[in-house]
């Protein structure tokens, strides 16, 4: 085979080289950090996914070296491939920020915001998205859409009210289980994930729909209400499963295995196993093997997403570098981050004593902009 | 009187049937194309004609045909879009119901040009009786050697299939249509790839509107250059307009795009003026998706010139002061109509018809509908109007398919031009429940900006 052609693409002023055929989203993920657009529906292992949620919209300010014209509309970065010399604006584009704020508002419009009773809380991509790109209130003053809960077989619960219709579970059911037991019924804001419950769900791999669901619409009934995810400890483990790779993450409390999931990468996508295939796990590993003796432990899982879940496991925590150790008499700080580094509170421009009333977030933001 | 190309003999007794249609000169274009022109020459004629797609977007048909990929050994398809579900649009129905052979004839010539041996008509489910009419016409054509194998001894084979939709507006969007035709849920596809490269069953496909394909018949009969002489500028040939609303003579009219909007509304040849001696308040000239205009901007452009009934004329002034030709669904509102209620009705339609794939359209259409209903019922706030504006702005351009835009534009245009009527619904809530805002100043002469 001839050598893979490389394209240069510049995203938020950072240039990377990627093979032809790479999407803007994947190129941006190579850069990482804020430059990677949020993706709520695209899921690398699932062919055909993406393009629907519109959170990953970016501005193409230069089409390519050959045809430098900008693209008139914002494009879904997950489904647009790069061209050589393309220039993309993500967080450097006010248009993108504005549209994304709109998309977040739309996604949350009918969402129940029942995080306190939702099993997904703490590892929910919609929560993360809301924190990072949303506003602090809603302009929606109507009754939210609700559905009743459904049991999809003995192991999975569908809480349609929380669904964002990303179609990931539909693709999973279609591609992984080879049998489409999920589909979408009806249209528009009354569309729902439907499954002919009686007909199947006996497929060995259907449990993977739980892992791909970005929100708490599909949850593991064997884990329901057992614990908050951030109190559980993720541990990599494996077993000699005959159906799947057997490579999983156990979510433990003490020696108790509360939950078993596939292993996910920093984008929340199921990792590939050594043979290069997606590491989907079978129902037996996921739902039945809850005894620590079923597993060979490899060690703690490194979680690098910045959601609440990773509070115990930060890989890149912003720790105050020097003084603290001294202050603490030589002891290393354990769970601590520098609040000043992540908030705007420490603004020399704000003179608290001169304020007519108590300071609020607005005070600082206002001063920041000056 | 304008030239009639499509509806030249629609009133002839029995034109629906093959014998009469043939006697009136039908199927000449098939003889001409198959016997004396190569497929590329047919495409060339269509290019020369300047024919623009009649389904709404107005994309040049010949150009679309020339984009069709032609890989070896892969079938190509022509799919005729007869889903016609845009509120206010009923011209394709007229063509198919009364002159079905015109569409069949156009399809044979077009399929020949594109190299399609199996062509489809995707027709909206509610037109169930027209399915029978079309199938009868196909049978007649087949029995007379215009379809099937080795047509006219040229070696060209063609079958035409009719497929009924199930009543979803979104299945008129060409990629949703293809999904539906393949037996799947009618969700629009994410583009690229475009149908010209990967369409029906993954093969190169051209999707054209019923009227577009019918217009190929006169183009081949008269020649592309002759066709292009009718009309003005990039609005060549004739266009069917389905006129409805508060007019004396609702119906389907063929215009040659050289007349003014004023003439179209008030002339007895067309709409015959506003019904019951009322005054014109507003109009949506191209089907529910295009921007509504108040009477003054409809009849005259912002420059103070007569607004013409063609692609460029209606679009004059952009969205700020103009609108679009769209599909030719001409909806007229008289002084008794309420723009707020009307906008709500449209918003309800788009909320109901959104496929729900992408978040801005799925959620935004429902939100707009609720706000408009609240305003209409006199329970709204002034800030709702700004909120509506912001919502439509965040839907427009950010969705997979143009239904999002189609839902946003009517709301945007209504607020742009009728904002005081919306405000009146808030400030005079009780009164708004008992009477309409009326004509107000919407027909007043505008100050002409130089
Ligand atoms: C929501 C939606 C509905 C549409 N409905 C129709 C329709 O009913 N009939 C039609 O011809 N085109 C319809 N279109 C336009 C088609 O996508 C496509 O542009 C057209 O069939 C192309 O044909 P033309 O080039 O001959 O106009 C629709 C588009 C959208 C976005
Ligand atoms: S249930 Fe979850 S995975 Fe399925 S469409 Fe809804 S949000 Fe997506
Ligand atoms: S814009 Fe609306 S109709 Fe079109 S794909 Fe998106 S949700 Fe579906
Ligand atoms: S991730 Fe690209 S549109 Fe959803």
Image (cartoon, helix red, strand yellow):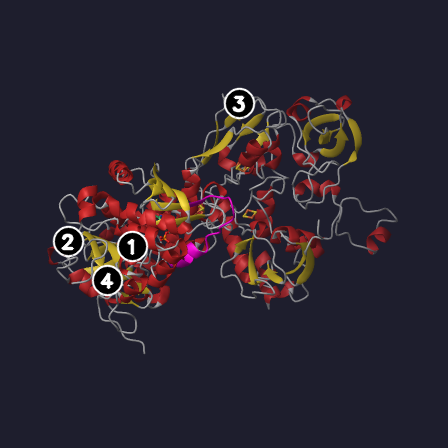
Instruction: Kindly report the distance in space between the C-alpha atoms of the residues bearing marks 3 and 1.
Output: 51 Å
Which residue position holds label 4? B256
Instruction: Kindly report the distance in space between the C-alpha atoms of the residues bearing marks 3 and 2.
Output: 57 Å
Tell me the residue at 76%/29% (across/down).
A238
Compared with A361, A235 (above or below) is above
Do the residues marked 4 and 2 share a common chain?
Answer: yes
Mark 3 surroundings: few (<14), some (14-19) or many (≥20) residues within 10 A: some
Secondary structure under the numbered disc 4 in the rendered image:
loop
Is B74 included in the stretch rendered in magenta?
yes
Secondary structure under the numbered disc 2 in the rendered image:
loop
Which circle, 1 or 4, is nearer the viewer? 1
Instruction: Kindly report the distance in space between the C-alpha atoms of the residues bearing marks 2 and 1.
Output: 25 Å
Which circle, 3 or 4, is nearer the viewer? 4
Which residue position holds label 2? B249
Q: Is residue B287 visible?
A: no
Which residue position holds label 3? A200
Which residue position holds label 1? B215
Quarter of the C terminus of chain A within the rendering: bottom right
Do the residues marked 3 and 1 share a common chain?
Answer: no
Specify the segment rendered in magenta.
B59-77
Which circle, 3 or 1, is nearer the viewer? 1
Q: Position of residue A119 (x, y in %)?
A: 60, 33
Which circle, 2 or 1, is nearer the viewer? 1
């Amino acid at each position: 085979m001839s050598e893979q052609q490389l394209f240069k693409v510049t995203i938020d002023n950072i240039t990377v080289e990627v093979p032809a055929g790479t999407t803007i989203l994947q190129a941006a993920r190579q850069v990482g950090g804020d430059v990677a657009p949020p993706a709520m529906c695209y899921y690398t292992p699932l062919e055909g996914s993406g393009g629907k949620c519109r959170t990953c919209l970016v501005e193409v300010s230069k089409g390519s070296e050959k045809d430098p014209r900008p693209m008139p509309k914002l494009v879904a970065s997950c489904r647009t491939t790069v061209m050589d010399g393309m220039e993309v604006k993500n967080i450097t584009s006010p248009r993108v920020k504005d549209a994304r704020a709109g998309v977040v508002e739309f996604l949350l419009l009918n969402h129940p915001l029942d995080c306190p009773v939702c099993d997904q809380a703490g590892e929910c991509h919609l929560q993360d998205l809301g924190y990072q790109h949303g506003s602090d209130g809603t302009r929606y003053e109507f009754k939210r859409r609700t559905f009743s809960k459904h049991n999809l077989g003995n192991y999975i619960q569908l809480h349609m009210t929380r669904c964002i219709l990303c179609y990931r579970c539909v693709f999973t059911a279609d591609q992984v289980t080879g049998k489409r037991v999920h589909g979408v019924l009806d249209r528009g804001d009354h569309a729902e994930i439907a499954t002919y419950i009686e007909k199947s769900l006996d497929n060995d791999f259907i449990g993977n729909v739980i892992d791909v669901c970005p929100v708490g619409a599909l949850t593991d009934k064997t884990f329901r209400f057992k614990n908050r995810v951030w109190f559980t400890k993720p541990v990599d483990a494996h077993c000699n499963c005959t159906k799947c790779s057997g490579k999983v993450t156990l979510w433990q409390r003490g020696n108790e295995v509360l939950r078993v999931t596939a292993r996910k990468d920093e984008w929340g996508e199921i990792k590939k196993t050594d043979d290069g295939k997606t590491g989907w796990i079978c129902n037996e590993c996921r739902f039945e093997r809850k005894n620590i003796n079923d597993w060979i432990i490899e060690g703690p899982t490194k979680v690098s997403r910045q959601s609440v879940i990773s509070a115990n496991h930060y890989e890149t925590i912003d720790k105050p570098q020097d003084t603290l150790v001294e202050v603490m008499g030589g002891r290393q700080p354990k769970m601590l981050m520098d609040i000043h580094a992540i908030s705007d509170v420490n603004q020399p421009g704000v003179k608290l004593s001169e304020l007519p009333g108590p300071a609020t977030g607005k005070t600082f933001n206002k001063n920041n902009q000056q | 009187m304008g030239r009639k190309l499509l509806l030249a003999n629609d009133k002839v007794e029995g034109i629906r049937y093959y014998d009469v249609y043939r006697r009136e000169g039908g199927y000449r274009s098939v003889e001409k194309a198959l016997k004396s022109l190569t497929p590329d020459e047919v495409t060339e004629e269509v290019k020369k004609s300047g024919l623009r797609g009649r389904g709404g977007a107005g994309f040049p048909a010949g150009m679309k045909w020339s984009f069709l990929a032609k890989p070896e050994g892969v079938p190509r398809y022509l799919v005729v879009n007869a889903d016609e579900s845009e509120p206010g649009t009923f011209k394709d129905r007229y063509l198919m119901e009364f002159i079905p052979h015109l569409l069949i004839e156009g399809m044979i010539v077009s399929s020949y040009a594109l190299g399609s041996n199996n062509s489809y008509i995707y027709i909206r489910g509610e037109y169930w009786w027209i399915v029978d009419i079309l199938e009868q016409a196909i049978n007649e054509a087949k029995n007379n050697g215009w379809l099937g194998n080795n047509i006219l001894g040229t070696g060209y084979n063609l079958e035409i299939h009719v497929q009924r939709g199930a009543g979803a507006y979104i299945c008129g969007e060409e990629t949703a249509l293809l999904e539906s035709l393949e037996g799947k849920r009618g969700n629009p596809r994410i583009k690229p790839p475009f149908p010209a490269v990967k369409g029906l069953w993954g093969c190169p496909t051209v999707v054209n509107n019923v009227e577009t394909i019918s217009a190929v018949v006169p183009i081949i009969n008269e020649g592309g250059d002759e066709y292009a002489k009718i009309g003005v500028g990039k609005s060549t040939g004739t266009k069917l307009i389905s006129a409805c609303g508060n007019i004396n003579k609702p119906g389907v009219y063929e215009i040659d795009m050289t007349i003014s909007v004023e003439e179209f509304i008030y002339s007895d040849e067309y709409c015959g003026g506003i019904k019951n001696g009322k005054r014109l308040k507003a109009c949506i000239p191209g089907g529910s998706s295009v921007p509504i205009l108040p009477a003054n901007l409809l009849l005259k452009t912002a420059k103070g010139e007569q607004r013409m009934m063609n692609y460029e004329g209606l679009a004059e002034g952009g969205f700020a002061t103009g609108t679009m030709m769209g599909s030719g669904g001409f909806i007229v509102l008289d002084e008794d109509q309420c723009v707020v209620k009307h906008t709500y009705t449209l918003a309800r339609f788009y909320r109901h018809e959104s496929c729900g794939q992408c978040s801005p359209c799925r959620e935004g259409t429902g939100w707009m509908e609720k706000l408009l209903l609240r305003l209409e019922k006199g329970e709204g706030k002034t800030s709702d109007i700004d909120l509506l504006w912001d919502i439509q702005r965040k839907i427009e351009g950010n969705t997979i398919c143009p239904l999002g835009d189609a839902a946003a534009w009517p709301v945007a245009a209504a607020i742009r031009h009728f904002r005081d009527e919306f405000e009146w619904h808030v400030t005079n809530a009780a009164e708004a429940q008992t009477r309409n805002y009326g004509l107000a100043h919407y027909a007043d002469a505008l100050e002409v900006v130089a």
